[in-house]
Amino acid sequence: MLRQELARAREARYEALMRVVMEPLHRYLLRRADAGAVDDILAETMLVLWRRLEDVPGLGADPKIGPDDVLPWCYGVARGCLTNAHRAERRRLRLVERLTRTAPPPGPGPGEADHAELHATLGTLNTLDREVVLLWAWEGLPPRAIAEATGLTPNAVSIRLHRTKKRLASLLDRKNGAHAGHGTGEGRSNR
């Protein structure tokens, strides 16, 4: 019976704390994290606050909690959770980059030509340029959709796409000694 009373008292203290800190912590995280990650980071922060409820300075047995007493410490917890989230995202991005860099290009399927030179040339591009050109060429996305997928602006995508296609054509021309992808008489006329 005593255990249940202690558990209820702990829950009441936690709920009182949440009423005071939930909104300020949400605003704090909104200004520092991607909108899509805020709720996850806030949930992690609330979990840490629950686990460390006894450590929260200014949180006594009194149900009345002063925001000035508890918020600074809670901001520190939120900051730590935010740092952990950023670190995890950087690790995830490095892993994705490493996997895309080391993954062998898919071999030609039945009836497909071998594009080993093209894949080797694509491998010389930086990760973002390669992703932009592959989203355009293989997925058929327009610059606006590529911008949404990569977090760039549509204008930045168009510029990257133009420069990357030009660089690819130049690299392939050097490898082949001809204008790659163009037959004689194709392209612009001088008239």
Image (cartoon, grey):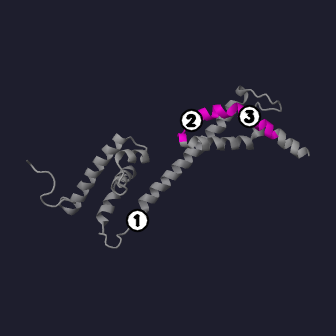
Please provide percent x and percent y for residue 143. 35, 46
Q: Amino acid at mark 2?
A: Leu
The amino acid marked with disc number 1 is Pro
- Crowd around label 3: few <14 · some 14–19 · many ≥20 (10 Å): many
Compute the Cα span from label 3 to label 1.
52 Å
The amino acid marked with disc number 3 is Leu
Q: Earlier in the sequence, mark 1 or mark 2?
A: 2
Q: Which residue is mark 1?
A: 104
Say above or below: 125 vs 50.
Answer: below
**Picture layout, residue 26 above or below residue 189:** above
Disc 3 secondary structure class: helix
Q: Which type of secondary structure does the marked residue at label 1 adopt?
A: loop
Q: Quadrant of residue 49?
A: top right
What range of the chain is rendered magenta?
10-35
In percent of width and height, residue 96 lies at: 47, 55
Q: In the figure, is residue 119 to the left or right of 3?
A: left
Q: Is 168 situated left or right of 185 in this image?
A: right
Image coords of residue 93 (percent x, y): 49, 51
Mark 3–mark 2 distance (CA, rounded to whole Å):
20 Å
View extreme (bottom): residue: 110
Mark sitting earlier along the chain (3/2): 3
| Left or right for 4, reference 149 | right
Mark 2 closeness class: few <14, some 14–19, many ≥20 residues within 10 Å:
some
Question: What's the magenta bit mostly, secondary-structure-wise?
Answer: helix
Q: Earlier in the sequence, mark 3 or mark 1?
A: 3
- In the picture of the structure, the residue carrying the numbered disc 3 is 17
Q: Which mark is residue 30?
A: 2
Cβ atoms under marks 1 and 2 closer than 8 Å: no
